[in-house]
Image (spheres, grey):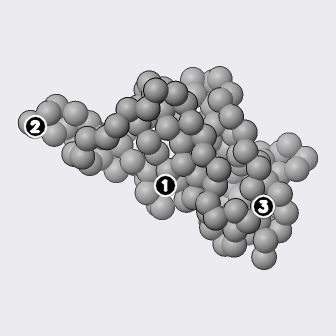
Amino acid sequence: MIGIRNPQTQQRRWEIYDTGVPVATDEPRAIPRDFVLGQNYPNPFNPSTRIEYSLPTPGHVALDVFNVLGERVTTLVDARQDQGANSVLWNSTDALGKPLSSGPYFYQLLVDGKPLGVKKMLLIK
């Protein structure tokens, strides 16, 4: 990833926007004390939902979505990220861009290969 540093503070900032592409900004952000995986919003959802999470330390982040059979349907994030708050918008499609059917799905946050939380969400069409 490419980072842009604020010349006054020398801080670098990454955010994930709806496109899933990391974007550097100069705005400082609060650093959380613990890993946090928030509940997606809205839930239930149609056709998209936002997932928020916070990192107290930098690390390699993987955010995956699974169906009720435990099969990974898509990976929303697979990148090294700095500490701070992040969010990603999921448009209820699989890894190939195909729309998924209604039903429960699960999302899991891993940082440096360690599972830090799993949450359930409900897609209603």
Residue positioned 29% across, 46% down in the render: 24
Q: Assign the N terminus to one quadrant of the image.
A: top left
Q: CA distance from mark 2 to mark 3?
A: 44 Å
- Left or right placement of residue 111 versus residue 97 in this view: left
Residue positioned 46% across, 45% down in the render: 86
Q: Which mark is residue 32?
A: none
At label 1, which amino acid type do we have?
Gly
Q: Is residue 85 above or below residue 83?
A: below
Q: Which mark is residue 122?
A: 3
Q: Assign the C terminus to one quadrant of the image.
A: bottom right
Image x and y of residue 44, in percent: 73, 65
How many labels, in total? 3
- The residue where tag 2 is placed is 7
Q: Who comes first in sequence, dot 2 or dot 3?
A: 2
At label 2, which amino acid type do we have?
Pro
Where, by quadrant of the figure, is residue 53 drawn?
top right
Q: Is residue 51 above or below residue 8?
A: below
Q: Which mark is residue 20?
A: 1
Give the class, few, some or many, for how many residues have Cα within 10 Å of label 1's Cα (few <14, many ≥20): some
Circle 2/circle 1 CB separation < 8 Å: no
Residue positioned 35% across, 43% down in the render: 14
Where, by quadrant of the figure, is residue 8 drawn?
top left
Residue positioned 39% across, 48% down in the render: 15
Circle 3/circle 1 CB separation < 8 Å: no
Disc 2 element:
loop
Disc 1 element:
loop
